[in-house]
Amino acid sequence: MRSTPQLVPLLYQVELELRVQFTEILGTTTSTNATTGALVVSGGVGISGPINANGSIAVAGTSFLTGIVSILGTTTSTNATTGALVVSGGVGIAGSIYGNSSLSITGISSLTGIVSILGTSTSTNATTGALVVSVLYR
């Protein structure tokens, strides 16, 4: 009677340079962190072309983006936790800010430098005009 050969698992560490025109990963494992998914890369990844993703992108750690960054979502903001861009921490901006709609700020604000009110609405009472100042009495 002939015996069945036993397979012995072997682990080799090999350095390999692979150059291919097209690679398709057919696995369907969902990624929930940096160590799960159909493709897991232990080292860094350099990509010289566009990246297209049909799902969420989660980035842990500091990120650096150069060039123009466009947020194409159109969700209207009604408070600090809604809108096409929501930032949980503070925001530091070294350049100018331009907006095409309203600006709402809650809390104490400090404006340094020249502040221009360019509205041309005529005031007809204490609650109308280009600048309306609300005074809280204690």
Image (spheres, helix red, strand yellow):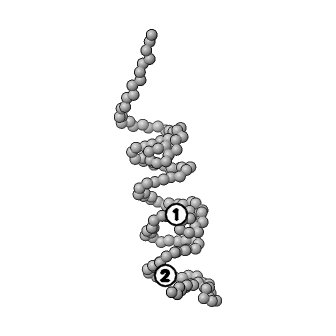
Residue farthest to the right, as pictured: 124
Task: Say which of marks 2 and 1 sits in front.
Answer: 1
- Residue 37 position within the rendered picture, expressed as x and y whole percent measured from the top left: 49, 43
Residue tagged by mark 1? Answer: 86
Frontmost residue, 116 versus 25 = 25
The answer to which image quadrant residue 63 occupies is bottom left
- Residue 65 position within the rendered picture, expressed as x and y whole percent measured from the top left: 45, 58
User: From what the image shows, is residue 24 above or below residue 86?
Assistant: above
Mark 2, other Cα within 10 Å: few <14 / some 14–19 / many ≥20: few
Residue 63 is labelled as none
> What's the distance in space between the residues labelled 2 and 1, CA to CA?
26 Å
The answer to which image quadrant residue 130 occupies is bottom right
**Residue visible at 45% across and 65% down in the picture:** 89
Q: Name the residue type under label 2.
A: Val
Residue 115 is labelled as 2
**Residue visible at 54% across and 65% down in the picture:** 81
Can residue 136 be seen here? The reply is yes
Mark 1, other Cα within 10 Å: few <14 / some 14–19 / many ≥20: few
Q: Name the residue type under label 1.
A: Val
Q: Is mark 2 on a helix, strand or loop?
A: loop
Can residue 22 be seen here? The reply is no
Counting every numbered tag in the picture gives 2
